[in-house]
Image: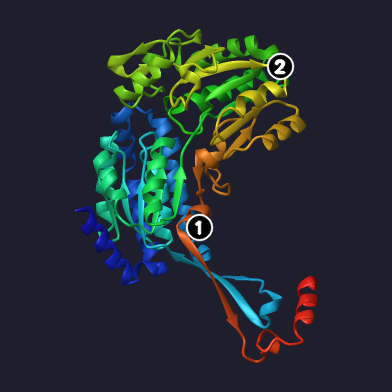
Amino acid sequence: MIPQLLQDQKKFFKTRAPYDISFRKKLLNALLVELTKREQDITNALYKDFKKPEFESVLTETAVVIQDLKLTIKKLDKWAKPKRVTPALLNFPSSDYLYAEPYGSVLIIAPWNYPYQLAIAPLVGAIAAGNTVILKPSELTPNTSALINDIIKTVFNPEHVTVVEGGVDTSTKLLQQQWDYIFFTGSVNVGKIVAKAAAQYLTPTTLELGGKNPCIIDQTANIKLTAKRIVWGKFVNAGQTCIAPDYILIHQSKKEAFYQAMKTEVEQAYSSTPKQSKDFARIINTKNFERLSKMLVDQNCIIGGQTDADNLYIAPTLIDEPELDSEVMKDEIFGPILPVISYQNDADLDAIIWSYNKPLSLYVFGTNSAKAKQLIKRYSFGGGCINDTIIHFVNHRLPFGGVGNSGIGAYHGQYTFDTFSHKKGLVKKANWLDLPVRYAPYTGKLNFVKKVLKWL
């Protein structure tokens, strides 16, 4: 089935129908109409999958996609237009251009934590760039995945865009095929599997992964506001966000005040019994619940720590001073658990942050702008914020992506279109002048050429 689907799409791509900008815009507009019409269905599906609050579903899923889709439709003609660039003097006289052309057959593998947004947003860019797409949504969110499948069938012909549902076996079969581009969002471990499969055919990839994102709070921070913004950024989606703060590094003089502020803000957001709150999501499945529960063993939970296996509930939790070799500090947490470690100086920060691979995000809280900028420049990471968390994700003018172990490539806004486009360089040489210096025989020309090259 999968090989035939891919062959049908390759055949359709060769008709060059997806190259037509008006064809792309027509389908993107049809997709916009369908997604707008079915927004309530989407939020309902997300709630069925892991009790995601409707407010969070709109804010972090449907609204993000609609905004991105409208921007793409508005800007597509400009993005796709050949760009004239300054020619090299050595090519005089010439006109030089960059052409954006589609790669061809694209595979998009989406994750479960934002199963709608992280499936549709890259899909929009791939279609806008003129590719055909096979989309593999997550099997861990069956209601959302089935709805995405239904939406795509309504808007697109399968030889252009189609959804393939299934588990690990399906992903394995998909990765065995020869693609022109692969876009994957998920864990580092699976990202390595995708990269290995892509390497067999030298297929270009974008890998949106994760990591242990540090959140530094220095002695100048506004603790009350810091706590409010961290509670939102960490516990939205029950902490199942790749750019959520993974651990806190707080100046020792501010730790006790921070704990008090966090207790207040958690209760303000989710009440004294977060398990009863309609605004707090659940863990995606039993496997992840058990993984997270192990992180709480023998830890000093300043806030939370309660669990309920039947309801896949883990309370918003703060852990005081965990050992660096403990379970909670080994890998990305990806849940509503937040370790807090105090520090005294920059050497303490270096010792901890540099002990991990480059993270997807980093956050700094403090009112000393010079110090905050120094920290942002000191460490390598995908993207981040000063005095807030995760909000850099919503600006389409900022590329979103990791570095090193946290990912390869970036997208959002025009960056998504660029990701799914090969930029083809072209020189158009004029005929009215043809300088003879480059042609053989070369006798007597070398010194002249050296002087010209030094001058350029």
Q: Amino acid at mark 2?
A: Gln
Residue drawn at the location 59% of the way across and 20% of the way down: 227
Quadrant of res 92: bottom right
Indicate left or right for 126 with 227 as reference.
Answer: left
Indicate left or right for 361 with 199 as reference.
Answer: right
Q: Amino acid at mark 1?
A: Asp
Residue 210: give x, y in percent of width and height. Answer: 48, 35
Q: Which residue is mark 1?
A: 418
Q: Is residue 166 visible?
A: no
Farthest residue to the front: give it.
443
Whether 313 is drawn above or below 20: the answer is above
- Front residue of this view, candidates 390 and 199: 199
Whether 345 is drawn above or below 378: the answer is above
Residue 369: give x, y in percent of width and height. Answer: 75, 32
Q: Residues within 10 Å of mark 1 (few under 14, many from 20)?
A: many
Q: The C terminus appears in which quarter of the rendering?
A: bottom right
Residue drawn at the location 42% of the way across and 14% of the way down: 274
Cα–Cα span, label 2 and label 1: 43 Å
